[in-house]
Amino acid sequence: MLDDVDISVENSLEPLLDANEWNVIETEFNPTQLHHKETVFTLSNGYLGTRGSFEESYPEDFAASMIHGIYDDTQISHTELVNCPNWLPLVVEVAGEQFGMNSGEILHYERRLDLRLGLVSRDVRWRSPQGHTVDLHFERFASLADQHVLAIRCQITSVDFTGEITVTATFDGEPKTQGTPHWQTLNQGGVDQILWLQSQTLHSGLGLGMSAKLIIDGDETAAVSVKNADFPTLGTTFECNPGKTVIVEKIVTVFTSRETDIPIAAALERLADEPRYTTLLAAHIAAWEQVWQNSDIIIEGDRQAQLSVRYNLFQLLSVAPSHDDHVSIAPKTLSGFAYSGHIFWDTEIFILPFLTFTQPALARNLLTYRYHTLPGARRKAQEAGYQGAMFAWESATTGDEVTPRWVPGANGELVRIWCGDIEVHITADVAYAVWHYWQTTDDDEWMHDYGAEIILDTAVFWESRVQWNQQRHSYDILDVIGPDENHDRVDNNAFTNLMVQWHLQSALALWDWFKHVYPEKAAQLVKQLNLTTERLHRWAEIQERIFVNQDITTGLIEQFEGFFQLEDVNLADYEPRTKSLQGLLGIEATSQKQILKQPDVLMLLYLLRQAYDYNTLKVNWDYYTQRTDHTYGSSLGPAIHAVLACDLNNPTEAYTHFLRAALVDLEDVRLNAAEGIHAASAGGVWQAVVLGFGGVRMTQFGPMACPNLPSTWKRLKFRLQWRNEWYEFDLQPETAMSVVTQEASVPVFATVQAVMVNG
């Protein structure tokens, strides 16, 4: 690992980085960082995610495996993504003493996450309490080639021990989710080398089947048998002597009732067909190689940036559902329980651009999830007294709102949460993602089948949500929460109003195209959504007259009505600190001050970059950046500030913001990485590098780059897919910039236009 890196200075621990910047390495086990490192060493495969807990467990660990779409009912947050049966348990005993990181003596330790291979490994030289020394090498992966396959390999070598070593493997069938039980074991057992578990969630009734087999190499006399009929365990015992090596493989398969009617039958059937560990690993590595071919970013001259960028991309690529369009990516991916595994705007605004440009099939799955939740969005709108589709601020399986309305405060008091009722900008955010996916991919078929209905029915919602202000002859959107959640129940939030303006403009433009290209489908939507001529005219009128308070002379935009009248404070007065300003001052006091949790007006200027000039960005940057809690506010902010700082030709300041995002999990810069991966920040890292430092903009001629590289970066190389063609950028400082294709290297200056490549 990169330990104790000051994000404001050059990294000083390069020896812990391997030569090719593909490995996250930990060379010393620190129990106080147990939960943080469990997050860091998370493995996922687009179906299941498992935190980086030890196979043999550790006291007070947060062992967890989560599967997309496996929710169960719970108090307060309605439903939560549950901790699934733990497939990891593998215990080694030397002369009757169980190996553990908290027993005996650790003579050597190294844990490694190989991002290129999607493989976690651990090497330990352990001396037991009785003085017996063994070398242990653990490896594990969640197969990207077959999402239902998981595998562990343990290599045991005696250093100075002669005697019996026992290895046992089992499942933890009924883990709790932050103290709440969610599983009922229906059946479990074992025969020969095979173990199985059949479970069901307590409330949602989702079934899970898990099976495993244990294989031994290096000792022909070692037999695997089933022990303990009440709690089935696979075990083997063998004689060891100095220099002898024995390898134990635990191959696991898992299915749920979301994919098949009888999960346990599917798991056992798949297990019977599975080859050995090395064959499974080879297929897994080949799958990762294909993914990295299009999604990798190469940075030369900054090893810390190179590794941290790859780490963030790895966590997104590994969790994106490749075979399921009824699920999405939660803010903590499949690595932690915070936010209950609910789906927010994080996915559409922060994660999707990376996938849209490098893995469009994965982006399409995530957007199709929103289509499947339209019935829930329509129910939410109707229950609130509106028309059309109003997306849930927090969504799960059905799209119905699952944001808790009341949560316990620090002193046990109940605190009202308004986000689910009035943080309505998510409806425009989803439409924005749909539009930009379509513009980037030219996927007319998906727009015909799914996208148009999303954009149009959410536009219907906005028509019913605005209010006419007779006094100033404008349309208002009252009682909302913008991206800056330090201020709730505000009127005419600029981000919301201007995103609604964009939404209605885009809906009208889409409809003008759609009704000519797909007249039959258009006729169907006219009837289904009541798209009358009067309705379309009203959309045009609303977008023309929606209210925004912007100084015509300076271009400064007021975040919401009355924001400029709030108390102005100097954020430097509260330093040093290790918590958010809201955490220091309290919810009510913070809401009365000009303190931002994250960019709001600046977020608007980022999403609608083409619509605002340099001066408008500069004046709003100068006003709002100094009022934003960059260190302990929202993790969604730093990457966006990095892009905008590049737009303002300030790569040094951009780099400071970039590192806050890039190292948020690796270095636990916000002191909350134990809760899980910061998925939105990870997606923002890609945007900071490609759209910020790379300066990529989409033009009528294709993607263009006007790079603004940090001073230490000697090279920035990446690929993008735009309208079914791949573009490869190879950017270097000064006049050395070039675009390298598979055919040629083309020297360019100042602005770079990528050349299409095949494949």
Image: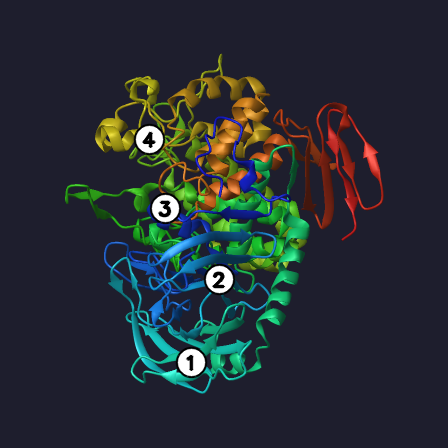
Give the answer, above or below, for where 716 lies relative to 128. Answer: above
Which residue is found at the position 72% from the left and 38% from the top?
Answer: 729
Mark 3, residue position: 33
The answer to which of marks 1 and 2 sits earlier in the sequence is 2
Image position of 6 (left or right of 743): left
Closer to the eye: label 4 or 3: 3
Q: Which of marks 4 and 3 is nearer the N terminus?
A: 3
Name the residue type under label 1: Leu
Instruction: Report the residue marked by disc 4.
Output: 491
Three-letter amino acid code at the position of disc 2: Asp
Q: What residue type is labelled 4?
A: Asp
Above or below 421: residue 129: below
**Helix, strand or loop for disc 1:** strand
Q: Which of 300 and 696 is in front in this view?
A: 300
**Residue, disc 2:** 135
Q: Where is residue 23 in the image (x, y as percent from the top left)?
A: 56, 48
**Which sits earlier in the primary sequence, circle 1 or circle 3?**
3
User: Secondary structure under badge 2?
Assistant: strand
Closer to us: 170 or 705: 170
Sequence-earlier tag: 4 or 1: 1
* Residue shown at 68% from the left, 44% from the top: 720
The mark closer to the camera, 1 or 3, is 3
Determine whether the residue tagged by mark 4 lies in a helix, strand or loop: loop
Picture coordinates of residue 121, whole percent (x, y): 51, 58
Name the residue tied to disc 1. Answer: 195
Q: How far apart are marks 1 and 2 (CA)?
A: 27 Å
Instruction: Return the residue nearer the eye: 469 or 344.
Output: 344
- Where, by quadrant of the figure, is residue 694 drawn? top right
Instruction: Residue at the far right: name it.
Output: 744
Q: Which of 372 and 299 is in front in this view?
A: 299
Q: Mark 3 is on which residue type?
A: Gln
